[in-house]
Image (tube, grey):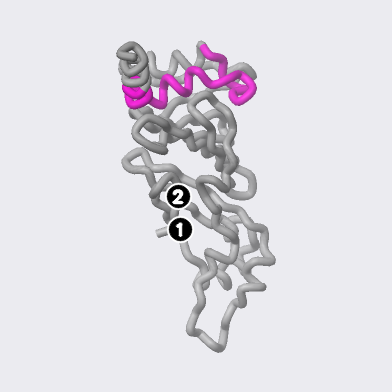
Amino acid sequence: MRFILLFFMLLGLSANAQNINSVFISMPDSLSPLLTKVNRQDFADFLSSGMKAVVKNRFGGKSEMLKLTDDYLMLKTTESSSEEMKLLPLNDSVNVVCVVRTFCGPAEDSQVSFYSTEWKELPLSDFILLPKHEDFYKQSADSLKTVSRDDFTKEMFIMKAELSDKDNSIVFKCNTLEAVGKENAEQMKPYMLDSLKYEWKDRMYVKE
């Protein structure tokens, strides 16, 4: 009985001591097509030595780790893509990993995913209800030149997500205006919110 209690105490301590770098290194190759395990190990080694954390990836290009803390990391995976990871607490002994992959097309567009620390993909809806296009629409009192919600949402919806290295928040920015023509962008801008911020509360992201 004493052995069993000690085992669970050590298990809890192990989970609390978990950091994002160890989870990142254990990432399966199927989720890391650009970076080998050696690449992932090298990033932290370079940073701890005061060097620029740049590696040659599987495709012969350069990937760079831009930031690493106990619970957050940011990678410039290619010239046109980046990746952020954040370790988020579910309870005192269990964490989940939020991963944001951002791609540059006509504008920066992000994909948000959640995984266990063993890299099993988890249902997105368990942790966040992503903003919709209309959530960025700001009703204006200007009755003469109103851009309707329908006018706004018929445009291509492009949204960038950014995790924070300082707290457990995530910010979404609507990049629709960067993809539409200048005339449409200038017309719609007064009716758009610049960003929406979500906070991690009770095991889920909640809009402020």
Residue 100 % position (x, y):
52, 39
Residue 25 % position (x, y):
48, 18
In the picture of the structure, the residue carrying the numbered disc 2 is 205
Query: Which quadrant: the C terminus?
Result: bottom left
Give the residue displayed 48% in from the left and 84% down from the top.
141
- Where disc 1 sits, the SS reads strand
Given the current orientation, which residue lies at the most extreme right position? 154
Front residue of 32/185: it is 32
Query: Which quadrant: the N terminus?
Result: top left
- Residue 93 visible in image: yes
In the picture of the structure, the residue carrying the numbered disc 1 is 196
Number of numbered discs present? 2
Q: Which residues are magenta?
A: 12-37
Q: Amino acid at mark 1?
A: Leu
Residue 92 % position (x, y):
34, 33
Front residue of 119/37: it is 119
